[in-house]
Amino acid sequence: MILRKATTAYLLILASLTLIPVSVYLTSPTAHAMIPFTSYQDLQEFVHTSSCASPTPSLYNRGGLTTSPTPAGLATAQSNSGSSQTPAHSETNQQVSGVDELDTVKNDGQYIYTITNNTVAIVQAYPATNAALVSKVTVNGTLQGIFTVDNRLVVVSQEPGYPYAYYGGGAKPPTLDTGIAKPSGIATIYPIGFSGTTSLFVFDINNHASPVLTTRVEVNGTLAGARLVGNYVYLVATQPVFCYGEILLPEQIINGQVVRATPVQVYHSDIIDQGYSFTSIVGFDATQGSPSTTAKIYLIGTTSTIYVSLHDIYLTQPVWSQSQQTIVHRISIDGLAIAYMATGAVPGHVLNQFSMDEYNGYLRIASTNCCSQNGGPMPLAYAPVSQQETNVYVLDKGLHTTGRLEGLSPGEQIYSARFMGDKAYLVTYKRTDPLFVIGLQDPAKPTVLGQLNVTGVSDYLQPYDETHLIGIGQSGTDVAWENAVRFTGIKISLFNVTDPKQPTETSRYLIGGPGTSSPAITDHKAVLFDRTLNLLVIPVEVTAQPQNATYWYSYQPIWQGAYVFNITPDKGFVFRGGITQLQSGQLPTWQDNNLFITRTLYIGNVLYTISNNMVEMNSLTDLSELGSVGL
């Protein structure tokens, strides 16, 4: 039985397992800034005074506020399209046009680059008659994703680091001997965290059969996100800071040359926290043979979700305390110019990157204040609201709150958000799926324009055009005796929002039974959508109830592959067929998951489905099989 209940237990587990700040104190409700440290002693004093001295740190405002610098000229986004001879082809499904996102698969209209078995396979893909595996690229660490730009392949990997030490009372574990001197009166040392290293490898792929490594950049910390804007790669990594022992500053290693940060290069916010991380933002031009890099380091609470526009990186810092907040830092990007601009805060927490959007000089944020389902406060994370609610905030360039809309859908949880121009679309859920249309024409007065209640839930919203949305999620039925909802399969919906006051669901398509899943629900990069072709493709694993099942909630996987649709406002979803890499009649099991399709793309008139073991090619016209390439 698949039930979705109150999220109290989940949030408690998340709060206990994730290294996140537990308290924030603001020096001013409307203005914040960052300033550099003056020395190592200055940095150490800041950390010890603000986060280590007591459960309730004193306000520690160092030197007051500074004026945010004026942004330099902003870089123009450059197209990654190939020559006029390159056939039309799909790209990674991006949140912001011109801002490419790290993914496991890329293509340039002729070659496909895909991560398989922790290597990057390069496949000559077009024309399909010449398709072949031409080379593989192997680097250190666990691969996180790739970019391609102007005959360059950028590979991002991550390696675990060594444990940091946490000092506490009690008996010392007999097998633990770190050799680190303990402060007076402290009996025990516990290893509680790993910094890790994030690396970027740039390969010249003019000769696809023999890629040449041109640049390697190593950054301390775990990956928080990466984007490609024009030719420039921007990477965000976080390295935790602990109270005792030496505070290790981040460093970069660029083609073997170590570049160590000094304390005067580290900026810190006037927002005081009990948990800190060094957040490094590194940028460089990936098309240069020996590129110069820029790195900016910020000592802030642990960076969580990031949102990136053409000109700004927004770092979010979740705060779980008696006053739940999300701290937001705006960092401008202009080629190699990376500069801190502003800090602000909104109540509640964001769901994912789609909870944020930049438009006409404003940042719009959708957040949720959480509390327990019965209205009582959660022990570790609670807010001054009687029940869970969704809010929308509009912030100016200085991240001051310009407008707010609070208290939407009390008692329900936000499941998806999408900002499109001067409107926002929010989906909350408990028993039904309310789709809210929010008017943002006046940034000072966000307004609910309309609402649509339908069964099931849309976990992801994909724009079709200015007046239509595609919702990808799950169908559901009410289980009153359990005070919950039973999900009964995948649901894709087409919403008509031409009249924002009366949104309608004009088409719906259901897939499978209870347990049916799709990576498209949680990963937008698994969605292939092209409006010019009216094409929608998503990977799915279909389940069904076995014959003579004893219990209604019994189900088993029966098929895995990609569902292909034509979609138009007039006809809605037209199912064209399914493509699988499994043999006919073969049931999907964990032993065969290397043949599970995870990504799809098209080049010219060929649809490519990609698993860990294979690239399969089918005609876009009739889905007939054209061939395959083993990886």
Image (spheres, rainbow, N blue to C red):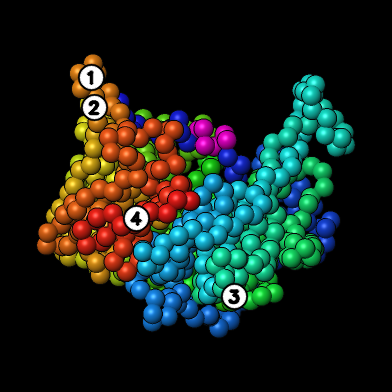
Query: Which label sits in the foreground, 4 or 1?
Result: 4
- Mark 1 sits on what residue? 549
Distance (Cα) linking label 2 and label 1:
7 Å
Mark 4, secondary structure of its residue: strand
Distance (Cα) linking label 4 and label 3:
33 Å
Name the amino acid, label 3.
Answer: Thr
Q: Are marks 2 and 1 in contact (CB under 8 Å)?
A: yes
- Mark 3 sits on what residue? 287
Distance (Cα) linking label 3 and label 1:
58 Å
Q: Are marks 2 and 3 in contact (CB under 8 Å)?
A: no
Badge 2 or badge 4: first in the primary sequence:
2
Where is residue 109, by image quadrant?
bottom left
Q: Residue at x 57, y 48 (%)?
A: 118
The local crowd at label 4, few if under 14, some if 14 to 19, many if 20 or more residues have their Cα within 10 Å, is some
The local crowd at label 3, few if under 14, some if 14 to 19, many if 20 or more residues have their Cα within 10 Å, is many
The local crowd at label 2, few if under 14, some if 14 to 19, many if 20 or more residues have their Cα within 10 Å, is some
Residue 339 appears at what percent x and percent y? 62, 71
Distance (Cα) linking label 4 and label 1:
38 Å
Query: Which label sits in the foreground, 4 or 3?
Result: 4
- Mark 2 sits on what residue? 545
- Farthest residue toward the left? 570
Name the amino acid, label 2.
Answer: Gln
Q: Provide the major secondary structure of the magenta segment.
A: helix
Residue 158 at least partly seen: yes
Where is residue 518, by image quadrant?
top left
Q: Which residues are magenta?
A: 12-17
Residue 539 appears at what percent x and percent y? 33, 48
> Which disc, if any, is residue 627?
4
